[in-house]
Amino acid sequence: MTPIAVRSPLWSLLLAAPLLAGATPGPVAPAPPPAREASTPDAAPVADPGLLGENLENAAPFVQPFDLDATRRMAVQVMVEGQGPFSFLVDTGAERTVIARELADRLDLGRSEKLRMATIGTSTALAPSFRIASLNMTDLSLTPFDAPAFAGRHIGAAGLIGVDMLEDRRLLIDFRSEKIDILPSRRHARRLIRDRDAIVVTARNSAGRLILSDARIDGRRIDVVVDTGAQSSVGNPALMKLIASRRQNSTAFYPAVLGAITGEDVPAMRTSIKTIEIEGININDLPISFADSKAFEALGLDERPALLLGMDSLSLFDRVEIDFPNKRVVLDMPSGAHRETGRRYADAGWMRGT
């Protein structure tokens, strides 16, 4: 059977370590012609650090509409060293913020050391990095830092916003209005989504990413990583073995190809899972690819069943709250749905865009 191609950077960035001392950066490619820039968004209210007390929930957030690209990932507008705005994807699965090589060359950013990366690919990759003096989204900023760089066509945007910019924040993603709020957070802060039918999931932290442990397939507990930078959900070989042994696939396995942020074509298998349960809610017939990826090894999830939960699953909900300091994810059920019934169909029409 001819493999299908899934061409998004399904796991953008997990692990970065400096290359061996003495490594020489490669030549700088000529800068490409200037790309058309997006129009500047309306000014958003700025969060006041003085509100980080008992009235934290009243703090003015960074609020910005986001664009859902063809792969269902969220793009927001950022300024790089005072220039822009440029379109960056919000990626809760990325340890570090990333810039497109073309944009780094265009802005004449200084080169830094090469970094060794773990991606969705089957081997680690070496990537050049560039020194960025400042990257800003209204009140959110990261200064200064070294950003790994990949080709823009493989990122699918001018860059990625990683957890290094989000680790002390909480995100409220509203898929109904296509808007994202980014608020300061602190330990024991009240959740923003308080609907009766909302699903509250406690997570653990691994290198900045939130891992949900109260997810099950046929009664077997699995680990789930919340990854807004992933177009679709990806499982490791241990998860594929579990699904096959318990006949939990609703379609036959077939070969596929995943597109990594490095440009690597990653061999994979693909099927749909009959049911995955997360905190009492069942998501049915969820399409999943499986790959022997360095991403799982970097998170210590290569030996037991694990899943990178991508935008195909997250966008099934009306709203999603991701609170990094409190290690908490809140899933807001769609209007008209009830937790008691607890059944959602990933490819039966209520996934947005179908």
Image (tube, rainbow, N blue to C red):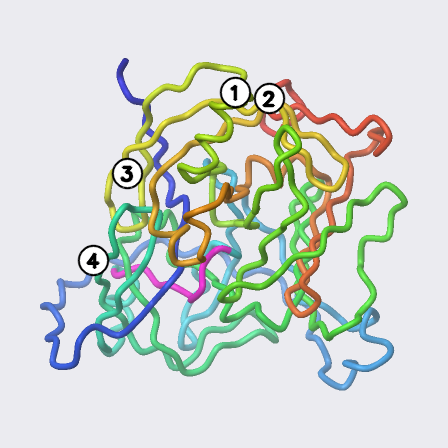
Residue position marked by numbered label 1 in the rendering: 249
Residue position marked by numbered label 4 in the rendering: 32
The N terminus - image quarter: top left
- Whichever of labels 3 and 4 marks the residue nearer the N terminus, that label is 4
- Whichever of labels 4 and 2 marks the residue nearer the N terminus, that label is 4
| Mark in the foreground, 2 or 3 | 2
Query: Label 3 vs label 4: CA separation?
Result: 28 Å
Taking the image as shown, residue 315 lies to the left or right of residue 130, namely right
Give the x, y percent position of residue 291: 36, 37
| Mark in the foreground, 4 or 2 | 2
Q: Secondary structure at mark 3?
A: strand
Query: Label 1 vs label 3: CA separation?
Result: 21 Å
Amino acid on which disc 3 is placed = Val
Q: Are marks 3 and 4 in contact (CB under 8 Å)?
A: no
- Whichever of labels 1 and 4 marks the residue nearer the N terminus, that label is 4
The C terminus - image quarter: top right
Amino acid on which disc 2 is placed = Lys
**Circle on res. 274:** 2
Residue 169 versus residue 105: which sits nearer the camera?
169
Query: Label 2 vs label 3: CA separation?
Result: 25 Å
Compared to residue 164, the image places residue 72 above or below, namely: above
Give the x, y percent position of residue 29: 13, 63
Q: Secondary structure at mark 4?
A: loop
Q: Residue at x 40, y 34 (%)?
A: 290
- Whichever of labels 1 and 2 marks the residue nearer the N terminus, that label is 1
Residue position marked by numbered label 3 in the rendering: 266
Q: Secondary structure at mark 2?
A: strand
Amino acid on which disc 4 is placed = Pro
Query: Label 1 vs label 4: CA separation?
Result: 45 Å
Highlighted range, magenta: 93-101
- Whichever of labels 1 and 3 marks the residue nearer the N terminus, that label is 1
